[in-house]
Image (cartoon, rainbow, N blue to C red):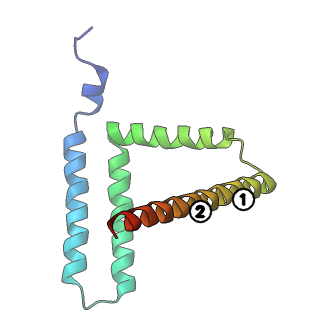
C-alpha cells in the first residue's frame, strides 16, 4: 500500500479541469455580453456549445463522475416507483380540496366569532 487513497491519484488534474470549466463559463458570459449586436440565435447556440463542453469536462472529474452515477441510480429508482392511477389521483385531489375548504370555513367562522367578541368588548 502506498498510503495514498486511489481517489487522490485519479483526481490529480481535477483542479485544472474545474478551472477550465470556470473559464468556459466566464467566456460564455463575456461573449454573450460582448456580442450583443449578434442574433440571439447565434449567441444561444454558442452558449449551448460552451455549456456542453463545460459539462463534458466537468463529468471527467471525480465529483462529476459521482454526479453522473447519482443520476443513473436516480433513473433506476424512478422506475421502481409505483405511480398512482388517474382515479387515485383525482380522489386524493378531491379529498385535499374538501379538507382545505372545510378548514377555510372553520377558520373564517372562528375569526368572525373572535372579531365579534372583541368588538362587543371594546365597543
113 left or right of 26 in image: right
Q: Position of residue 33 (x, y in %)?
A: 20, 80
Q: Residue furthest toward the bottom?
A: 37
Query: Which label was assigned to residue 94?
Result: 1
Is residue 85 or residue 88 the one in the foreground? 88
Q: Position of residue 116 (x, y in %)?
A: 45, 66
Query: Nearer the viewer's eye, disc 2 or disc 1?
Result: 2
- Judge whether 72 appears above or below 2 on screen: below
Separation of residues labelled 2 and 1 (CA atoms): 16 Å
Q: Position of residue 118 (x, y in %)?
A: 38, 63
Q: Residue at x 20, y 65 (%)?
A: 26
Q: Residue at x 35, y 59 (%)?
A: 53
Quadrant in which the C terminus is drawn: bottom left
Dividing the picture into quadrants, the one containing residue 86 is: bottom right
Task: Check disc 2 and report the residue beneath it.
Answer: 105
Q: Residues within 10 Å of mark 1 (few under 14, many from 20)?
A: few
Is residue 41 or residue 93 the one in the foreground? 93
- Judge whether 122 appears above or below 20 on screen: below
Mark 1 or mark 2, which is nearer the start of the sequence?
Answer: 1
Q: Residue at x 67, y 41 (%)?
A: 81
Is residue 50 or residue 111 the one in the foreground? 111
Amino acid at each position: 500500500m502506498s498510503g495514498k487513497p486511489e481517489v487522490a491519484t485519479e483526481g490529480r488534474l481535477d483542479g485544472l479541469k474545474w478551472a477550465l470549466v470556470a473559464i468556459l463559463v466566464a467566456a460564455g458570459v463575456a461573449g454573450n455580453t460582448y456580442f450583443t449586436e449578434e442574433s440571439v440565435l447565434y449567441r444561444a447556440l454558442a452558449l449551448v456549445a460552451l455549456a456542453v463542453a463545460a459539462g463534458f469536462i466537468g463529468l471527467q472529474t471525480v465529483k462529476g463522475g459521482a454526479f453522473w452515477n447519482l443520476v443513473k441510480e436516480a433513473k433506476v429508482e424512478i422506475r421502481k416507483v409505483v405511480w398512482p392511477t388517474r382515479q387515485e389521483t383525482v380522489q386524493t385531489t378531491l379529498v385535499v380540496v374538501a379538507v382545505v375548504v372545510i378548514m377555510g370555513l372553520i377558520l373564517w367562522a372562528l375569526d368572525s366569532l373572535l372579531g365579534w367578541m372583541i368588538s362587543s368588548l371594546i365597543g
